Amino acid sequence: MVESTQFKLYAEKCAQLQHESEIRFAGIIDKDGQLIAGGFKDGLVPHESDDLRLQSFLEFVSKASIRTEYDETLGPINYLAARRDKAVLVSFPFPVTQILLLISAEPSANIESLAKKVVEIFTDVK
């Protein structure tokens, strides 16, 4: 029951993020790279047409974001960002639960503003 309630909350937070004009995808990914909440904005056609490549990417991001080898000297990862020709990709690890939030946004998106919006939405307890 708790897990179901948590997934519902994650889905609601992802839906809030999808209302932002520059965000294309907001989803919660588990440690195995599986989408457990959220997804693409309604009516949006993903850039990635090959489901297998998308799944491989989700697994890579999941593993990279949860790494902790530099946490003691540099502090934990707040987020990882990549700017590509067709999209900005940002992942936010939730280390305690070993899940992460993955955002895909338009290439014109401001990464710092996007990160601030994510923090606002995910720390807003209603």
Image (tube, grey):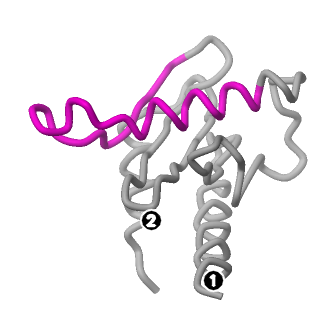
The answer to whether residue 120 is above or below residue 33 is below
The residue at which mark 1 appears reads as 5
Residue 38, horizontal then vertical, whole percent: 71, 57
Q: Range of the magenta residues?
A: 54-83
Quarter of the rendering containing residue 54? top right
- Whether 78 is among the magenta residues is yes
The residue at which mark 2 appears reads as 122
Q: Amino acid at mark 2?
A: Phe
Q: Is residue 75 left or right of 18 when viewed as pictured? A: left
Label 1's element? Answer: helix
The answer to whether residue 125 is above or below residue 68 is below
Q: Residue at x 63, y 83 (%)?
A: 5
Callout 2–callout 1 Cβ contact below 8 Å: no
Residue 80, horizontal then vertical, whole percent: 41, 31
Tell me the quadrant of the picture where the N terminus can be found. Answer: bottom right
Label 2's element? Answer: helix
Q: Residue at x 83, y 32 (%)?
A: 46
Q: Is residue 70 left or right of 111 when viewed as pictured? A: left
Which mark lies nearer to you, 2 or 1? 1
- The residue furthest left is 73
* Badge 2: residue crowd in 10 Å (few <14, some 14–19, many ≥20): some
Residue 19, horizontal then vertical, whole percent: 66, 57
Residue 12, horizontal then vertical, whole percent: 64, 71
